[in-house]
Amino acid sequence: MKQHIAIPGAALGLLSLVGALGFIGPAWRANKRVETEILAMRAELAKPSDSPEIITGLANRLHELQTKSRERMVPIPETSDVAGLMTRLSAVLNRLGLVQREVTTGAETAVDETASLPMSVTLRGGFNPIFEAIREIEHLPRLVRIQRLRLAYESRGQSDQFNSQEIRADLLIDVFFGAKNEPIEEVADASHEGADE
């Protein structure tokens, strides 16, 4: 007799569980769908808009990047200043002990918004001074480009072949000038005006 009571009780419990899941399941899924929509709306609201704070932040960031850009850029002077360049180059070569040298300049050529002056430099000496001279030329405080570099051994005599050799370096350098630096300044001023408003 106890066994007959247990079966209807178990059936009633199973029926209650199925009924509860039938009602709770759809409600749970609907709740999850609403939560997903809420998260999507929060993400949309978190995206940048055209609010004054965002515009000011972007203007400040633009100014920072322009400042870093100006600090890292090598200036392009408005004039070629060949005399100043030759004086600086001669001082570097004298300091390195490279007295056997020839420096000639060519005709100016237009390059986009600037001009270029080709300069041919021939040096004779030991490897270390020549190497250091090339590094110094490459890092002059103005924009230069080493267009061509040719290194060759030149023998001075037959007695001691190894010690009597010197290096000959032929360099073709482009020296840039004639740049107008105002556009960067104008953009920087415009970005500050927008930030102040």
Image (tube, rainbow, N blue to C red):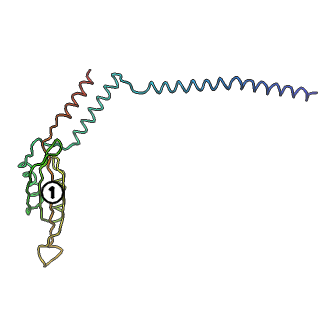
Question: Image quadrant for the N terminus?
Answer: top right
Q: Nearer the viewer, residue 108 or 4?
A: 108
Location of the C terminus by quadrant is: top left
x and y, in percent, of residue 195 in the image? 27, 24
Q: Which residue does the image show at 7% across and 52% down from the upper left?
A: 86
Residue 187, horizontal then vertical, whole percent: 22, 31
When the figure is inspected, residue 66 is found, relative to residue 31, above or below; the finding is below
Q: Amino acid at mark 1?
A: Leu
Which residue does the image show at 14% across and 70% down from the upper left?
A: 154
Q: Residue furthest left?
A: 83
Mark 1 sits on what residue? 172
Q: Position of residue 186 (x, y in %)?
A: 19, 31
At 52% from the left and 26% from the top, the residue drawn is: 39
Q: Nearer the viewer, residue 37 or 59?
A: 37
> Few, some or many C-alpha atoms within 10 Å of disc 1 (few <14, some 14-19, many ≥20)?
some
Q: Quadrant of residue 94?
A: bottom left
Residue ranking furthest to the top: 197
